[in-house]
Image (tube, coloured by chain):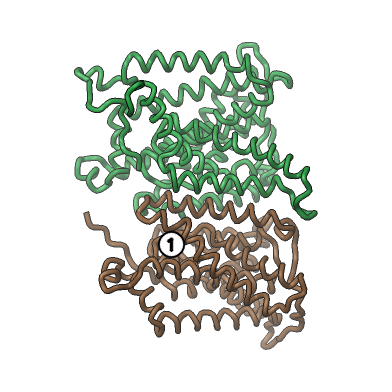
Amino acid sequence: MPATRMSQTGNYKTTYRQDQGIFANRKELIWIVLLLVALLLAPLITPRTMLRDFDLIMIFGIAALGLNITTGYTGLINMGQGAFMGVGAYAGVVAANAFNLNLFFALLFGGLSAALIGGIVGLPSLRLKHLYLAVATLAFQEIFTWGVGHSRLLAQGGAIPAPAVSIFGFRDSFLTHNLFWYYLILPILAFLVLVWRNVLRGKHGRSLIAIRDNDRAAAAMGINPATAKLTSFMLGSFYAGVAGVLLAYFSKSVVIEDYGLDVGIKVLAMTIVGGLGSIPGSVFGPAFIIGLDRVMEQVANWLGGLNLFPSGVDVATALRPLSFGLAIMLFLMFQPHGLASWWDKLRQYVTRWPYKS
Amino acid sequence: MSLLFQLLAAGVVTGCIYALAALGFVLIYKSSRVINFAHGQLIAVGAFIALALTQRGLNFWLSALIAMTLTFFLGVVIERFFLRRMVGQPIISVIMVTIGLASVLDGLMYLTPYASSNNSYPVNFTGSISFAGISLSSAELFAVAATLIFLGGFTYFFNKSTMGVSMRAVSDDQMAAMSVGTSVQRVFALAWAAAGLSAAAAGLILGLKSGLSLAGLAGIGLKVFPVVILGGLDSVLGAVVGGIIIGIVENLASGYLDTLVPGGGTGAVLPFAVLLVVLLVKPYGLFGTKEIERV
């Protein structure tokens, strides 16, 4: 697990107020505000098709942040994040269709349903550790996929349309679809990041990290491992549920293919590529993986034009898993702390320039 | 009653293939504590190599032999280049490397025309044997026989050969094995090699029995999880017993439960339900070693 990262050696906090603050210092707050302003202005200069990828990055960023809570901060391996997204998406969309809920209640309902299921699936984590838990979540994912595929209520995994959304008089239309969702998802992501940062500085967040580092020692310090593990699972799946509802609304319908085992593995890969136990990493990871997908589409187009391969071979279907797998393996072998550690190194380099860090 | 016997027999056949697939998985876990998510892909690679060779006009048995030799070395290469770097890393990183490997192997197979179509080996395995109301095709009988031969061979290897004994020693206590001069690296490499070989064998047998498709072959990689959890992750005997039990469960479910559930397909999901129950009740399986944690 990544070591604690500090921008400077030593701890310069002199009051309890400082130690308990959400933000490390005023400088950080200023940077965050500047970043948010930049993100709000970003659609002005990005083409519309790229905006779609930004939306997807933010949606998967929420899911990856949730997985980071469970896996990165608490150390419980969860391979079923796709299923938790699915629970949220189905609960949110079906409830919204049935009771005419608006988007925010759908998000809340989807997230809470996912959290409830997450609590149940997390139960084995009280007895099992490490890879046994990974296998248990894998089994849950398989059962979920099968269950949805065999239930008439959920159209046997076929498309269930999500209701159209309008907020403050703005409506989701064909031309402004990506832009509309950009401004809708961004505040949700920012809010969820803030919530997690806030949890992290208090007792509950810190007890999760203690459980990750050594659960016996944590228990000896008076932390209840059972509560902490279940909290972590529920919180992680709440985030997944919200991401699932957003994905369903964003793609205008919910289909089982969007919530399969491969999605859970993709989110896990995003979390690892971004950096386990890092908030900025939770967004870097999705950006990297989705960006890689786009680049590979271009490469596949170019390679396909060269006629190097025998007929019956679709270069794009081959390149996608190939590049995805290579990226994960190379990151794990050469950069196990993910993109977040590059980010930290860059920050240190800038702050310490002209000295060597 | 004859339906029951027929289902049981089919279950044993499926179970034998699962056992063979789970064998390699257990070998890797037993020696190096690595969960191999790329096992299904190894199975598929072996089966497709043999297919490519037979389609070039080579004799089936010869190409099967070549395929098994190649996957043997593929196992060695994988261990040498990817897994050896991961020794001592957190468990999630090791799992993720094998997932990445699965993805890479998938991609490589998609570069060949075999991955996106259904094929079968151009060999004739016709005819069937029936007794007491049970009928088994000769491909199925061959599957059982081949599995038994392989399992026998591996058992002999573990109990009689020096390398097999040192593999058992490493899985028992790595430090102690090292201190008496066993090369742990060699054992890890051999475990992957043996896993590659048995995976290819499983792929070949499955291909003979029910045709070759990437989804069907690589899907076995997921189906071994119920098998090995039930049998115990580090037990070779457990892999065999677990495989046969899961095979029987699967066939009984699709024989009796499918009519009750709209859409059917209970055989695919019930093993995973069994897995969850086993994990909750008896996490180390039927024959697995209990992990003892010291603080």
Residue B43 vertical position relative to residue A86 in the rendered view, above or below: below
- Foreground of the two, A213 or B165: B165
- Label 1 CA crowd tier, 10 Å (few <14, some 14–19, many 20+): many
Residue A181 vertical position relative to residue B95 in the rendered view, above or below: above
Indicate the chain on which mark 1 is placed.
B
Residue that lies at the very extreme toward the bottom in this rendered image: B131
Residue type at mark 1 is: Val
Q: Is residue B194 left or right of residue A203?
A: right
Which residue is at 44% across, 72% downward?
A: B238
Where does residue B80 sit, x and y in percent of width and height? 46, 61
Report if residue A115 is visible in the image: no
Q: Quadrant of residue B46?
A: bottom right
Q: Which chain is green?
A: A
Which residue is at 50% across, 55% downward?
A: B98
- Foreground of the two, A307 or B218: A307
* Image quarter (top left, top right, bottom left or bottom right) of the N terminus of chain B: bottom right
Residue A82 vertical position relative to residue B257 in the rendered view, above or below: above
Which residue is at 74% across, 76% downward?
A: B58
Q: Quadrant of residue B31?
A: bottom left
Q: Which residue is mark 1?
A: B278
- Foreground of the two, A267 or A43: A43
Q: Is residue A10 left or right of residue A299?
A: left
Residue that lies at the very extreme toward the top in this rendered image: A169
Report if residue B156 is visible in the image: yes
Q: Which chain is brown?
A: B
Q: Is residue B122 left or right of residue A253?
A: right
Where does residue A266 sit, x and y in percent of width and height? 55, 43
Where does residue B192 sit, x and y in percent of width and height? 48, 66
**Secondary-structure class at tag 1:** helix
Q: Is residue A280 left or right of residue A186?
A: left
- Foreground of the two, A162 or A296: A296
